[in-house]
Every structure is written in structure tokens, then in C-alpha cells.
Image: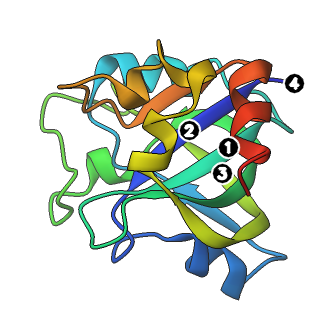
Amino acid sequence: MQYWLMKTEPDECSIDDFAATPDQVIRWDGVRNYQARNFMRDMAIGDEVFIYHSSCAKIGIAGIVRVTRTAYPDPTQFEPESAYFDKRSKPDNPRWDAVDLQFVRKFARILTLDELKNVAELADSPLVQKGNRLSVIPFSKVERDSVLVKV
């Protein structure tokens, strides 16, 4: 099993959206960064993903979901009315991928970025590095376990 962190704005897709429909999957689409896309391509069914709320009042890790479907072409790249439309992407040669995720657990509280910056095991993580805006980040088991101790 691998571990990941995916950043989202809670008004777009939050841990509460997953918790509201725990038996359903939510398609994680709209990623338009090649490194983040490539990380999504490395995901396997059953991998754990921390949901990280960003661009909001309480920034931090809000809960856990799991991968239920590995990377497949993101349909929004082909929809002209979508904010994620990419005119250079073609159905026979898609540029962007999506994965399906399902609810596992909502934390009783947000583990804030300030708290995460003080976790020694995360010192080298892109999550706490200045200037990192990557929306998908791999986590080691040690990093994952160090976060779960804080919940």
C-alpha cells in the first residue's frame, strides 16, 4: 500500500462531501500539473489518501479516503464548458487523468499546517516546504504514521 496527500479547496470537494456519501465514490479530476498527474498514475486500488483542505480558514488535513479506481482519462479535459477543458488534449491521446476515491474517515479536527510543520518526520516533505503548490504528494509510511499519531 502507498500513501498520498491530495489538496483541495473545501468548497470544491471536502472531506464532508465524501462523508455525506460514504458508500459512493467521488471522481478526483481537474488536476492540471504533470508531476501531480504522474503521482496519480502511480496510485493503486486501496491506497490511502489524506484529504488536505487549502485556500480556506482552517488549512490542514481533514481525513482519509482510499483509491477505488486507478488513473483513467479525466473527462473534464474534453468538455468545452468545463473550467478544466484542455483544447490540446484529444480522446485518442489524453493529457490528464482522474482517480476515484471513497470515504474512510473524517478527523475530529483539522490537523493544521502549523501543527504539521512541527512534525519532525515531515521536515523534508513538500507539504511543509515553502513555495510548494503541488496538489498531490506521496507520503511514506513513517510520514503517514506520524500524522495519525496527532489525530
- Rendering colour mode: rainbow
Please identify the residue farthest to the top as the structure is shown: 124
Number of labels in the image equals 4
Under circle 4, the secondary element is loop
Pick the quarter of the image with the C terminus: bottom right
Residue placed at 24% from the left, 61% from the top?
55
Q: Earlier in the sequence, mark 3 or mark 2?
A: 2
Quick check: marks 2 and 1 in contact, CB under 8 Å?
yes
Query: Image check: 24 left or right of 112?
Result: right
Q: Position of residue 58 (x, y in %)?
A: 36, 69
Q: Residues within 10 Å of mark 4 (few under 14, many from 20)?
A: few
Q: Position of residue 101 (x, y in %)?
A: 68, 54
Residue placed at 44% from the left, 44% from the top?
74
Which numbered disc covers residue 1? 4
Residue at image mark 1: 49
Q: Between 134 and 61, which is closer to the camera in this rendering?
A: 61
Q: CA distance from mark 2 to mark 4?
A: 14 Å
Q: Position of residue 126 (x, y in %)?
A: 40, 21
Q: CA distance from mark 3 to mark 2?
A: 14 Å
Q: Position of residue 64 (x, y in %)?
A: 71, 55
Disc 4 residue type? Met
Q: Can you tell which of label 3 and label 4 is closer to the viewer?
A: 4
Disc 3 residue type? Asp
Q: Is residue 1 above or below residue 26?
A: above
Disc 1 residue type? Val
Q: CA distance from mark 3 to mark 1?
A: 11 Å
**Among the 4 quarters of the image, the one containing residue 4:** top right
Q: CA distance from mark 3 to mark 4?
A: 16 Å
Residue placed at 28% from the left, 47% from the top?
78
Residue at image mark 2: 5
